[in-house]
Image (spheres, grey):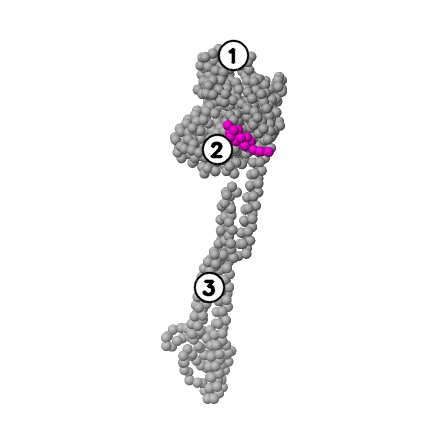
Amino acid sequence: VKILIVEDETGLRESIEAYFTGSDSICETASDFTSALVKVSLYRYDCIILDLTLPQGNGLEIVRHLKTNRHNDGILIISAKNSLDDKLTGLDLGADDYLTKPFHLSELKSRVMAIVRRKSFNGNDILKFNEIDVDLTAKTVSVNQQPVKFTRKEFSLLLYFIANQGKVVSKSAIAEHLWGDSIDIADNFDFIYSHIKNVRKKLIEAGGNDYIQAAYGMGYKFSEA
Amino acid sequence: MKLLDKYNRVNIAVTVVIMLVTGIIYYYTISHILTGQIDKDLVLEEDEVFSYVNRNHRLPDVYESNHQQIYFTALGDKRIKRRFLDTVYRDAVEKDLEAGRALISTVNVSGKNYRILVTQSKVETEDLIRIIFMITICVIVTLLVILIVLNRVILKSIWKPFYKILNQLKEFSLAAAANITSTPSQIDEFNELDKAVITMAERVKTDYQNLKAFTENASHELMTPISVINSKLDTLVQTGEFSDKQSKLLNDIYGTVTRLTRLNKSMLLLAKIENRLIDDDQEIEIKEVLEECLYQYEEMILQLNIQLNTSFQDKKLRTSKSLLEILLNNLISNAIRHNYQNGKLTLNLTPESLTVSNTGNGIFDFGQVLKRFHKSDRSEGIGLGLTLCKQICDNYGYKLNYRYIDDLHTFTVSF
């Protein structure tokens, strides 16, 4: 998976790059409008992570440029401006998703992976992870071809873990993903544990492996063995 | 007391007193002058008697002229002191008593002393005084009436600009778009007041705008460093093994950053709502938003074993989805968070209103709770929840009410 990170804030750009590099992803970065425009003109990416407020120009122009040239790159806008205008304009222009700063890297990864999946699977909406099959359209899960009943939150949790496989995902990030950011996250830490326990139990009972490990009391990690 | 009434009262009291005093002085003066006049008549009569006696050496015949009587009485050797006195006058024709003035004097006729008593009726004088008095009273009353009416009319019209300015001040609101308009007047003081009020209102508004803009910009600017901290933390936890002590510290940092983020987002949101910058209005079925909201809290409701009663009727609103979510989220989350084990939560949606009532500990002061950053000792929130609710309701013209009845905290949003 080839990803372009367009972000002028060095600290954030480096963190995203570090989080995304590895496994099967290649990351490129651009820190200003001009270099980003050069890159999107020369190369194609599976997903472009795009900050809107850039030195020398507005990120929306890059979206416009990509769309006028009929490039099908996935676009995820990240912006500190939680302004609805920007969000709507961005999505109208053809961006795939919009994420407001600050965000957890795991949330960003899960959104990027969703875009990449949508772009590459072309209607075949089954996400495979070893013996686990996740049907993204029907929102069902099967292990070894045996359907397993998942609740809405458990389904969302499993998908989140698969997107962030091999990474430690913090409890704050999980809570925010499951309950949204309008809800006080600390209230929900206890419930994360019970949801994760349920997911593990269901996967193991259906004959799957135990992929979820607790990580130093801070969060959880989904990985092979 | 109104300025007009106060002014009128003082004015009229002073006028009446002055008029009364002048009236009394007037009365005595006229009375004195007229009595002097009568006394002169009496002296004239006395002189006539003296000259008659001198000429004829006998008393004149007693006669009665109009309003004047004269009597002689023999005194022998005595003389009496000459004096004027107020007395009664017996009218021979009308046979009644009238106020009179008399002069007593002594005349010597051929060695014998006689007392002269000349009496004159004061009826005409008193009539004259009465007429003068009546006219004076009439003048006073007319003057008073005219004074009151004139004061009222003139003052009313003069004070009109003042009341207009006052009304504008009463209706002045920092958040409202309307400005105070100029009230021209012919009176310098009011013009000055008008100018001062307009300048003040503009200055206050500008300051308020600046402050709001500052809050919004500050919150915005804070988002970038917060997101860097957040992403660095996410990266840090990937780096490997942590001791229990380290992971406890990291957890605390995570928690704090999350709180900081929420606080900042709420402040930004509040600034935006106040500035009416959120305008994604659309037709929304409230029931759906409520159900989604309850879904978010299902774990907490289950854990506290809260008895949930819902009754939702169809109600569509044209409003911002994100704001409606925040409003309902806050109301429901408060109702759950301040609830106790095995408590109750009742949600009632009708086309007119939404009611959220719950059991809970303690009573609170609704007015206090609406203040920014107010929270109870036990609360883990950031203290902006109900402030946000109120602001959202204000923006859309809903009414947010709180009552505490039968151990139930009840919030009502009337659409």
Q: Quadrant of residue B309?
A: top left
Query: What residue is drawn where x is 46% and y is 32%?
Result: B321
Judge left or right: residue A106 versus residue B349.
right
Find residue B356 and report its horizontal and vertical position in percent: 44, 30
Which chain's residue wears label 1?
Answer: A
Residue at the left extreme?
B94
Magenta segment, which residues?
A: A56-70
Would you name the residue on which mark 3 appears? B143
Please rate how many residues cluster around mark 2, counting C-alpha atoms within 10 Å: few if below 14, some from 14 to 19, many from 20: many
**Host chain of mark 2:** B
Q: Residue B331 in magenta? A: no
Q: Residue at x 40, y 35 (%)?
A: B352
In this rendering, the label closer to the viewer, 1 or 2: 1
Three-letter amino acid code at the position of disc 1: Asn
Task: Tell me the kind of residue under disc 2.
Answer: Leu
* Number of the label disc, if any, that sits on residue B323: 2
Q: Which residue lies under the disc numbered 1?
A: A209
Residue located farthest toward the bottom when viewing the structure as drawn:
B56
Gap in angstroms between the C-alphas marked 1 and 3: 109 Å
